[in-house]
Image: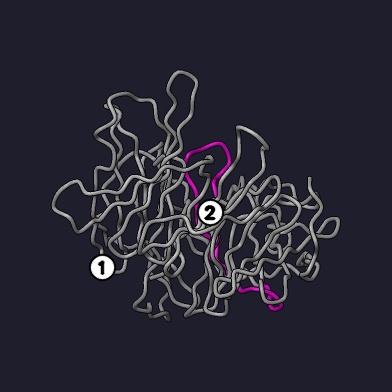
Amino acid sequence: MKTYTIVGVLCALIIVSCSKSENTTTSEGESENSTLVLSDYALLLNKDGIVTTQVLGANADTVLLTTKTTNLKKQAIPNLSILKGANFLQYHKTNNCTGVITSHDFSTDVTNEWVVFENLSACDFVVTAIAQQNNALYVSYVVTNENTNTYMLRVFDTQSTDVDFVEISLSKKPKDLVVAGDKLFILTLDELVSDENSLFVMDLQTNTITFEIQLGYDAERIFTNAHNELVISYDELHATLNLSTLVISYIRYTDGTNPNFVNAKSNHFDAAGKMYYAAVSPSNSIYSKIPAVHDFSSNLTTLYAFENFLTEAKRTVQFQIETATAVGFDEENGLILIGYKKIGVNKGGLLRIKPAPELTFIDNIDVDGIPFEIIDN
């Protein structure tokens, strides 16, 4: 790995430990003294390989199943998906080798669908990343022909009545896409020569690559945080790119302080800019993934090991927790939302806890499927 100049602060790791608070739990969500708030939680569930939704109603001390439905159609788990705010974007490669992108806005319950590949005659392409902003879709993909890879980016105008796209050739393999302001950031890999990563910056007005930033080896993914920064994730460090100045800073972790968001499939931010995600757990937890919260302003991570707020009986017998699968935040009630898979079955549940320093277990509810995204409406 190339040597980096460390201009950020070191990340500290906080393992939450306190007395186990055992508030009354309910799987039916019944409470005579509770009034539901108007907002709902919408859970995206993996039910035997199919995307389904479950809407829950909740206040500060009660959560219950509702009969409310959404217009998001049931279909196979997507090849790629992104949740940004209340908008769920997913890509499916179909059996006849076309490609379809579906966008669903949970705030309006409106679904849109676009066929983005119907002019490629063979199943010789792989979509590597998708992104959306306003009326534009961005799809990066790799075409393999006679052991030669061609790297491409398609930009679609979703308001066009015809199939209307711009095709852009890339010199390196695209791994991830992020739209921020008037720019598209493309995380790339030079798989032909150096095996190093770089960041292409594309002007959205002209659809041209304006410049390239070298990132060294092993950059895995990119996303924006709430501090006007693009975050570049590595295994042993992360970098932040100021979106206004395009100045990059590196934050290396000391031993045992890795926040482990590099492998998080999704993340959520609260109003204060803290990020919520399922993290690969350290050696002090028996679970493969546990809830985590990272504060980019202080570069501090709080890990919420299940052992620290649930008894063994609740974890293994009552809730049958196998691993954390999704983490969100209820802004109105100030609660962390933890989706999890149950042991040995394709079912799961949702736990709610009050965050540190007043770590308190609030309640649990079972759901018919494994949560992989949580939307707080």
- Return the residue at label 1: 108
State which quadrant residue 59 falls in: bottom left
- Using a 10 Å C-alpha cutoff, classify the residue at mark 2 as few (fewer than 14 neighbours), some (14 to 19) or many (20 or more): many
Q: Position of residue 164 (x, y in %)?
A: 22, 49
- Taking depth in this image into account, of 347 and 195 the one nearest to the observer is 195
Real-space CA distance between mark 2 and mark 1, rounded to the nearest whole angstrom: 33 Å
Does residue 317 appear in this view?
Answer: no
Q: Which residue is mark 2?
A: 200
| Residue 80 vertical position relative to residue 134 in the rendered view, above or below | above
Residue found at x 27% / y 48%? 165
Q: Is residue 94 above or below residue 178?
A: above
Figure quadrant of the C terminus:
bottom left
Provide residue 1's location: percent of width, then percent of height.
78, 45
Query: Which residue occupies 71% across, 66% down?
Result: 249
Q: Is residue 108 visible?
A: yes
Residue 232 rendering spot, x and y as whole percentages: 63, 57
Instruction: Classify mark 1: helix, strand or loop.
Output: loop
Whether the magenta-drawn stretch holds residue 358 is answered as yes
Span highlighted in magenta in the image: 336-359
